[in-house]
Every structure is written in C-alpha cells, then in structure tokens.
Amino acid sequence: MHPETRTEAGRALHAVNTAETYRRRVVRGLDINDWHLELDAWFARGNYWAALDLLAEIMDAVETLEQFDDWEPEAYWYEQAAEAHTRIGEHDKAVAVLERWLQFWPPERIRFDMAPQRMQRKLDAARTRVARIR
C-alpha cells in the first residue's frame, strides 16, 4: 500500500514494524552492515574464530529479519562463514552454512536469481572437498 493511502493505524503499524526491523539489525551494538570492515580485518589477520563468532550472531539476526520482511538473508554473511570454516579446515561446517542459507530460497525462485545459483556452485565445491578428504 502506498504510504499516502495508509490509514493512521496503518501508518502506526508500519512505523512499529520498521522500528522493530531496525532494532533486529543490531548485533553487538552495531547495524549488521557496519561489520564489513571489521570482518575484513579479521580475515586479513587470519582471526577466523572471531569472525565465526560474530558471523553466527549476524546469521541468526538476518534469519530473524527474514521472518519480518520476507526477504532471503543476504548471501554475503554465509559466504564469509563458509570461507572461514574452509580456511580452518572445517569443510563439513562450510557445507552446513551454505545449506543453511539455501533453505531460505523457495525452489521455484532459485533458477531466476543469481545468488542462489552462485551459492549452489559453492556448496557443490564444498561437498567435493569433503568427499576428497574422506
């Protein structure tokens, strides 16, 4: 519904939902998008454990947001977590993270969007690594 056509109650409900969505975007006192540079720095220093701790909180937050705004969680966080797991040799956990992200995509939409196709390729590569290790 266009904002100008909303009733007063509709505008109030929209304001509450918007405030709640922004509140849920906060992880450790920052909006989730404010963590990109810190994550890059941790990766550059090889501090994958710190990155994974933060990424676990961010993935939980974006999955909660998905329930509010009906958008799939942003792939970036899951890609970063899978990469960190891979770099420390936790290939099974890299597979699990990629599978976790793909579960949010309805199968009929996967073929129309590049992000799930890219993530599926990463998942296939991660599964191949796991199979070679075993």
Image (cartoon, grey):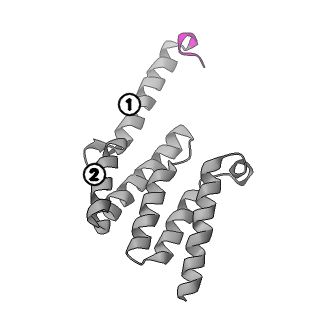
Residue 120 horizontal side relative to residue 40, left or right: right
**Residue that protrudes farthest toward the top in the picture:** 4
Q: Residue at x 53, y 86 (%)?
A: 133
Marks 1 and 2 in Cβ contact (< 8 Å): no
Measure the C-alpha gap from mark 1 to mark 2: 25 Å
Q: Callout 2, which amino acid?
A: Glu
| Amino acid type assigned to the residue bearing label 1 in the image | Ala
Looking at the picture, how far across and down is residue 30, in whole percent? 28, 43
The stretch of residues the image draws in magenta is 1-5
Looking at the rendered image, the quarter that the C terminus falls into is: bottom right
Residue 18 visible in the snapshot:
yes
Badge 2 element: helix
How many neighbours does mark 2 have within 10 angstroms: few (below 14), some (14-19), or many (20 or more)? Answer: few
Query: Which quadrant, please, contains the N terminus?
Result: top right
Q: Residue at x 52, y 38 (%)?
A: 69
Image position of 51 (left or right of 67): left
Residue that numbered label 1 is attached to:
19
Residue 15 screen position, x and y as percent: 42, 24
Taking depth in this image into account, of 15 and 98 the one nearest to the observer is 98
Quadrant of the rendered structure where residue 83 is? bottom left
Label 1 secondary element: helix
On the image, which quarter does residue 56 sit in?
bottom left
Name above or below for residue 102 compared with residue 33: below
**Which is nearer the eye, 45 or 91?**
45
The circle drawn on residue 38 is 2
Q: In the rendered view, would you say 34 is above or below 18?
A: below
